Amino acid sequence: MDSGLDHQDGRPMEPVGRLQLAESRERNATLLAHAGGVMEHVFDQIRASGSMVLLADVDGTIIHSLGDPSFVDRAGRVALQPGACWSEGLRGTNGIGTAIEERLAVEVLGSEHYLDRNSFLTCSAAPIIGADGELAGVLDISGDFRNPQRHTLGLVRLSVQLLEKRLFEARYPNDILIAFHPRPEYLGSLQEGLIALGADGAVLGANGAGREWLARAGRSAPVSSFASLFKIGFGAILDRASMAPNALLKLDLRQGGELYLQVRSLRPLMVSNPGMQAMASVTAPTPVAEAAARGKAAGGGKRSGEVSLASLSTGDERLQRALDRAMRIEGKGIPLLIQGESGVGKELFARAFHNSGPRADGPFVAVNCAAIPENLIESELFGYVGGAFTGARREGGVGKVQLAHGGTLFLDEIGDMPLAMQTRLLRVLQERCVTPIGSTKSIPVDISLVCATHRALREAVAASEFREDLYYRINGLTVTLPPLRERSDIRPLVESIFGAELAEVRRSGVSISDEVMNFFERYAWPGNLRQLHNVLRLAVALMDEDEHELRAIHLPEDLFGSEPFDDAPARPRSGAGAAQPAPVEEPEHAGGRLKAEPRSLDEIKLEAITSVMREVGGNISAAARRLGVSRNTLYRKLGRMH
């Protein structure tokens, strides 16, 4: 052999030192972060089969592993473990090293291993290709050659495809992602192509399937932009995607043929949402145009443009009571517990509380306790020192509690925090010190604590699902935010949000019809403020430039006859002067009245279609654009009318 290897060489090859392993893990931090969950899922599939799952870097050095203890001991005798290099140059033919050399998925069984001492292994490995098209690492499943599993290589391939998809999406988090495939049933599968595009339609990158397809499509000329690939304009696709998210589109290619396409992610519109901060910034009912102007200027906090407790005052009695009580504890070190249904604006209230007090210039650190995996929440909250656990960064990580020093720590959905973490949090709150994982040094922290939950914590305490001592520690002042269906300030809220949405698209002079506003005031709003905001955003997107009034035709269909408040009467709104709501009356539009008595959704759809068809003079394309559906869909619906 050119490498000088002797297949009978039985000398052990020791793993690299701890420092070198830590450096390799640091270089591959992104790969490790996304591979960890995939490897755990794979190991769940092969658990108790006498196997192990391994992740190696581009040099063949194993940087992470999971395995059955009985087999891990045997594998350790040939250094099949983290820190060991399994390149072909050092170990001859083997799963990891050969996958690197061939850039292909491989299976190496028993005596096919070059070194005799490795002949008890069966290895299935596949290369991991990064978002840049370069080798990022190798995923391998190894076991006893006497117990081979027929589908192991297929499992490795599928797992690598999933990992590559996650790496690609992580590489382009703030860009436009488009999924495509010649066959519509493959959209959403691991075989779909993915392209990342800039705001101008330029191609920034593609996943493996996408690169293969672009290479075929660009034989005559390189594919550098959306316009060089499809006949339709890029702006038209974005408009259609904003009106009908996740809609399946069939597009003609410039080189002939067609593709099915879905827009998966538009630009980072959700990262910063000014409209949400203007959600409750109007202190009295005003015209929509005034609401837009006020939404831009409202705030009242320590810094211009930031939501404050004062700016949330809209006239609802229950909300005002919560605001008044929260104002009284500003700067006094009393924990605040916010309760309410999902979507009522608990985080907005927490931000307003922070911005209104003496800590407004400090950090506001939000943690969703329900969204963080249980095995990560400890390091997320309290931080860790370098090398504290597998995959830890060499320099360590600062926890959310420490990041909130001098400001406010907001623990959302604290009712879902694991009991073990509740114990550690209680100690931090009592001692006002945090100890990172792997450290013996306590770090003093000065934080204002705000918590939120949709759960009844008293009941959780009674059921032993939440620590009683922690409950009394976080429950300095409890405020309960009313659900939207019980609030008496729907009109100013609607005007404020609608005005902010119009300002986002630089429109003015648009009003809301009385029928629609009356409907809004009587609707049950199961999704609360979040649903109201989404409804108005969609309505603005569906309005044509020459339309100056929001009507029923611009509202989403599921508002009419929707669950779960279909047959339930609307609850009385809060406030001494609030009128008792009438039965839900659906608003008028230019074809008659959406009747108060129950009707099927198909009847409502067909009435809306009739109105739009009349307005556009029977032009199918124009009607389809206005309704946000394809021409084929519109033809099918029209066929049911005759």
Image (cartoon, helix red, strand yellow):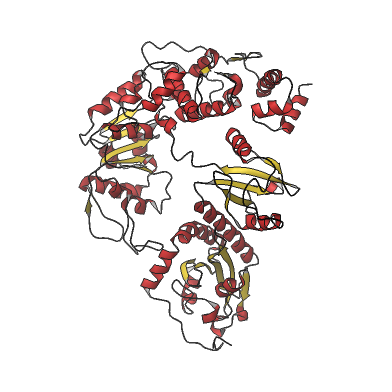
* In this rendering, position of residue 539 left or right of residue 608: left
Q: Residue at x 43, y 77 (%)?
A: 15
Q: Nearer the viewer, residue 87 or 173?
A: 173
Image quarter for residue 212?
bottom right
Above or below, 289 against 189 in this view is: above
- The image quadrant where one finds the C terminus is top right
Q: Position of residue 378 (x, y in %)?
A: 35, 52
Q: Position of residue 102 (x, y in %)?
A: 62, 72
Q: Position of residue 552 (x, y in %)?
A: 59, 19
Image quarter for residue 572?
top left
Q: Is residue 148 visible?
A: no
Q: Residue at x 32, y 46 (%)?
A: 422
Q: Nearer the viewer, residue 489 or 42?
A: 489
Q: Position of residue 187 (x, y in %)?
A: 65, 47
* In this rendering, position of residue 399 left or right of residue 611: left
Q: Is residue 635 visible?
A: yes
**Which residue in the rendered view is the most extreme toward the front?**
221
Q: Residue at x 56, y 60 (%)?
A: 45
